[in-house]
Image (spheres, grey):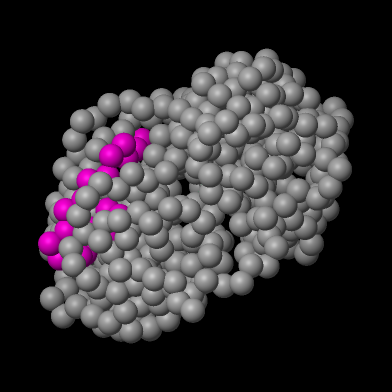
């Protein structure tokens, strides 16, 4: 939903310790996929724990526009009556994916091998993001794309009438690109192959297997080789969406930097393609206990017990980037409180997210009195340790939920309050952020 909404300025300030249980909502990546795979199945898929953030609601609206029937039975509980692989009908109007890169790229893939035409758009942030990374491989299947200069939205995709199977090595580490290709491959006859040099989140592979597709993954010297047999009949599933580790990152990091805090965060994914932040925090000296390891909704999870900790700066290995790509903004905020420098390299992809996240974090941290260094694909935060973080600034969020939440968390432990110019986009991924954080004892308010 990309209608221009008035900004919601917000401020966070230090108050007492954070205490309690932080039950974060459903995983955004899995929620998008549950709706899309449900729409491509024959019969009724039942989803529980769906994230009802705006990004996912926009994907739900898109699935309706392509002909699937979606019903919200109760909060987080949805049914999807799918149309089957190749069964999408042509939408009568423009598909608006709002702020969501995942939504638009996966849906483009899902319709690209069906002989229909669809036009996609999004908000001012999404309209700046590159779509060529998806339309290039979709062209190999026979789909055509016409967008604005530089492969930007709005963009029309003309689906292939006679799709062919493809073999494609992703040029950037991106689960969205990988997933778009796999979704297109679903309606191409024969075996398609996607090769990724670095492992990215694997929800598409896991869930497609669950929905009955023939899909295999092999680790080879070239990287991960994923082979999918086209034109399966996908079987509807009961999907229990696990909690979102990318949302869990905010209460976890807040507890680490606010003195005296002790917070439990249940059901945090331990999926190796998602847990890089937690590994990094432990290396920094974070007091996190991983309790009760188990499986939930097909994902390995644990309950986290997090206590305020003295942290030290670390070098984050570049090969860890894909497993924590959405967590660099909050890591940069936490790094400001550590003793010594935290170096984040191999993070070029951060420049093409909802905002240029290297630039957004660097400018906001500087405004809060923190020294940073940045380059095309790195960010170094010089932690202030015992000196503390001055704060006292208003940070620009550039329609980016993770930038907004990161600076609000920073404000909870800074010497002076920290404001963000617009907290509205937080609702795209973590609509209960404010309620959850204030419930733990945080002072976060909306400014008039
Ligand atoms: O596939 C997904 O669900 C996602 C993939 C990542 O994007 P890229 O594929 O662009 O790295 C991530 O940043 C995004 O929040 C969700
Ligand atoms: C990058 C993100 O999402 P998307 O690409 O789906 O907009 C994110 O949620 O941090």
Query: Is 252 included in the stretch rendered in magenta?
Result: yes
Relative height, residue 89 to residue 440 (above, below): above
Q: Position of residue 276 (x, y in %)?
A: 33, 47
**Residue placed most toward the observer, 298 or 159:** 298
Residue 196 visible in the shown view: no
- Placement of the N terminus among the 4 image quadrants: bottom right
Residue found at x 58% / y 44%: 56
Residue found at x 79% / y 54%: 155
Start-end of magenta stretch: 250-272
Q: Does residue 274 appear to the left or right of 105 in the view shown? A: left
Q: Position of residue 403 (x, y in %)?
A: 45, 66
Q: Does residue 1 appear to the left or right of 204 in the view shown? A: right
Q: Does residue 278 appear to the left or right of 361 in the view shown? A: left
The answer to which quarter of the image holds residue 307 is bottom left
The answer to which quarter of the image holds residue 60 is top right
Residue 239 visible in the shown view: yes
Q: Position of residue 176 (x, y in %)?
A: 58, 44
**Residue placed most toward the observer, 409 or 18:** 18
Residue found at x 16% / y 53%: 262
Relative height, residue 86 to residue 168 (above, below): above
Relative height, residue 360 to residue 211 (above, below): below
**Residue placed most toward the observer, 288 or 415:** 415
Residue found at x 28% / y 26%: 294
Query: Is 379 included in the stretch rendered in magenta?
Result: no
**Residue placed most toward the observer, 264 or 41:** 264
How many numbered discs?
0
């Amino acid at each position: 939903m990309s209608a221009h909404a008035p900004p919601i300025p917000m401020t966070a300030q230090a108050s007492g310790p954070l205490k309690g249980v932080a039950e974060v909502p459903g995983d955004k990546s899995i929620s998008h996929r549950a709706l899309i795979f449900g729409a491509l199945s024959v019969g009724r898929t039942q989803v529980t724990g769906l994230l009802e953030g705006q990004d996912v609601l926009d994907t739900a609206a898109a699935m309706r526009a392509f002909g699937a029937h979606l019903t919200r039975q109760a909060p987080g509980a949805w049914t999807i009556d799918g149309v089957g692989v190749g069964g999408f009908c042509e939408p009568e109007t423009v598909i608006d994916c709002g702020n969501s890169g995942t939504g638009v790229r996966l849906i483009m893939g899902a319709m690209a091998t069906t002989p229909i035409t669809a036009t996609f758009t999004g908000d001012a942030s999404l309209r700046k993001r590159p779509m060529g990374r998806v339309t290039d491989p979709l062209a190999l299947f026979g789909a055509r794309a016409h967008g604005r200069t530089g492969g930007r939205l709005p963009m029309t995709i003309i689906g292939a009438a006679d799709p062919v199977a493809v073999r494609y090595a992703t040029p950037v580490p991106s689960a969205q690109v990988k997933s778009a290709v796999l979704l297109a491959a679903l309606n191409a006859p024969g075996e398609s192959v996607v090769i990724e040099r670095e492992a990215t989140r694997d929800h598409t592979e896991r869930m497609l297997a669950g929905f009955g597709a023939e899909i295999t993954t092999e680790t080879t010297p070239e990287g991960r080789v994923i082979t999918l047999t086209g034109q399966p009949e996908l079987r509807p599933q009961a999907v229990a969406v696990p909690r979102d580790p990318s949302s869990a990152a905010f209460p976890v990091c807040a507890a680490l930097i606010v003195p005296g805090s002790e917070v439990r965060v249940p059901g945090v994914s331990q999926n190796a393609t998602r847990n890089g932040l937690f590994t990094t925090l432990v290396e920094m000296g974070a007091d996190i206990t991983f309790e009760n390891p188990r499986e939930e909704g097909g994902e390995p999870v644990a309950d986290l017990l997090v206590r305020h900790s003295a942290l030290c700066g670390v070098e984050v290995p570049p090969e860890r980037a894909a497993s924590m790509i959405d967590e660099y903004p909050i890591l940069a905020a936490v790094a400001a409180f550590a003793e010594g420098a935290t170096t984040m390299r191999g993070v070029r992809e951060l420049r093409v997210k909802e905002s240029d996240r290297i630039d957004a974090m660097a400018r906001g941290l500087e405004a809060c009195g923190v020294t940073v260094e940045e380059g095309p694909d790195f960010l170094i935060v010089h932690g202030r340790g015992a000196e503390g973080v001055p704060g006292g600034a208003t940070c620009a969020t550039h329609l980016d939920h993770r930038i907004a939440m990161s600076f609000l968390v920073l404000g909870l432990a800074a010497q002076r309050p920290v404001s963000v110019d617009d907290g509205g986009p937080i609702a795209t991924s973590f609509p209960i952020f404010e309620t959850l954080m204030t419930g733990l004892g945080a002072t976060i308010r909306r400014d008039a």
